[in-house]
Image: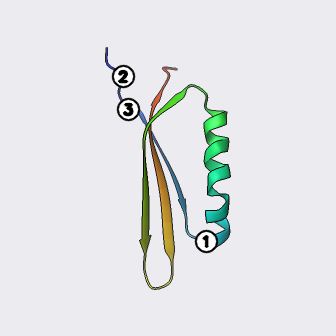
Amino acid sequence: MENRINLVKTFSVTKAREREELGARVTAWIEANPGVQIVSTFLRQSSDDRFHCFSMVLLCIAAAA
């Protein structure tokens, strides 16, 4: 049977301090989930007149429970 994406993990931040800490948050999540294989990542930025939102989306294959 072909492995398929069965987990989508999204990290989203709007504040400057959160953006600075995003890499550490993602790394901590990856380390805490060794049974997850990241297949693809997407980075998105959106903004309006007051806020800038940055999102990192991980498409993953998680080991069966």
User: Which structural element holds mark 3?
Assistant: loop
SS at mark 2?
loop
Say what amino acid the circle numbered 2 marks. Answer: Asn
Residue visible at 64% across and 44% down in the picture: 27
* Mark 2 and mark 3 residues within 8 Å of each other at the beta carbon: no
Check residue 61 in the rendering and tell me which mark sits there, or answer none: none
Q: Quadrant of the N terminus?
A: top left
Q: Position of residue 8 (x, y in %)?
A: 44, 41
Residue named by callout 1 = 15
Image x and y of residue 61, in percent? 44, 29
Which residue ends up furthest to the bottom in the rendered image?
49
Q: Is residue 34 left or right of residue 12?
A: right
Residue placed under numbered mark 2 in the picture: 3
Mark-to-mark CA distance, 3 and 1: 30 Å
Residue type of the residue flagged with mark 3: Ile
* Mark 1, other Cα within 10 Å: few <14 / some 14–19 / many ≥20: few
Q: Residues within 10 Å of mark 3 (few under 14, many from 20)?
A: some
Q: Earlier in the sequence, mark 1 or mark 2?
A: 2
Query: What secondary structure is marked by label 1?
Result: loop
